[in-house]
Amino acid sequence: MGARSSPGAVLACVIALAALPTLAGCAGGSTRSGGSGSSGQERHEKASEQSESNEEAAAEKREENAEATKNSELLSEIEARKREEAAEAAAKQTEEAALAKAKKREHTADREAKKKEKQAAERVKKAEEAARAQAVTRQREAARRKREQAARETEASEGVSKTTTQPEAKTQTTSAGQQ
């Protein structure tokens, strides 16, 4: 029984072997009824042989049943091992998928953080440039006002000197015209 066989095939063989002694007993009974006049000892020997044959068949049947049980247990162990390996593979695949998803989320978060930092830096730079431009505009406006103020003061001071010098000129012309 070195070759593997299915439990159904083993059972069929066991039934066939168990039926052989019964069939042999029927065949032996037909010869006895033939009137060969066998003695009680021959009957006893035949019964003993049949009993031995039955015992051998029963022992072989027990052995085959034990082997079938052992094969069934081995098959169950193999199936359990396969289920366990499949579950481990599925768990590993799930873990790898979760790890990949976490890495992707981390990468996306890093990219978003860098994008926000860049946008913030650009806003700060624009605000600084606007502040500088506004400061330059204020300085220019202040310088323009100073120039205008200085020009008004200069104009006002020149206007005062012209008005003071002009009446004298008129007076001089009038005095010259009177002479």
Image: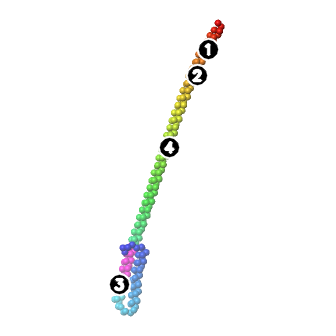
Q: Which of labels 3 and 1 is toward the front?
A: 1
Q: Position of residue 71 (x, y in %)?
A: 40, 71
Q: Helix or strand or loop: what does disc 4 sit on?
A: helix
Q: How many marks?
A: 4
The crowding category of the residue bearing disc 3, from other C-alpha atoms within 10 Å (few below 14, some 14 to 19, many at least 20), is few
Mark 2 crowdedness (10 Å alpha carbons): few <14, some 14-19, many ≥20: few
Q: Earlier in the sequence, mark 2 or mark 4?
A: 4
Q: Nearer the viewer, residue 1 or 133?
A: 133
Q: CA distance from mark 3 to mark 4?
A: 98 Å
Tell me where residue 27 sits by quadrant: bottom left
Q: Residue at x 42, y 62 (%)?
A: 85
In percent of width and height, residue 168 lies at 61, 12
Q: Which residues are magenta?
A: 53-67
Q: Is residue 54 magenta?
A: yes
Q: Which residue is mark 1?
A: 166
Q: Residue at image x 45%, y 53%?
A: 99
What number is the disc on residue 116? 4
Please state, as top left, top right, bottom left or bottom right, where the C terminus lies in the image: top right
Q: Nearer the viewer, mark 1 or mark 2?
A: 1
Q: Pointer 1 and pointer 2: residues touching (CB < 8 Å)?
A: no
Q: Main secondary structure of the magenta part?
A: helix
Rendered image: mark on residue 49: 3
First of labels 1, 4 by sequence position: 4
Quarter of the rendering containing residue 16: bottom left
Tell me the kind of residue under disc 1. Gln
Mark toward the viewer: 3 or 4: 4
Please state which of the two labelled residues, at mark 1 or mark 4, is closer to the viewer: 1
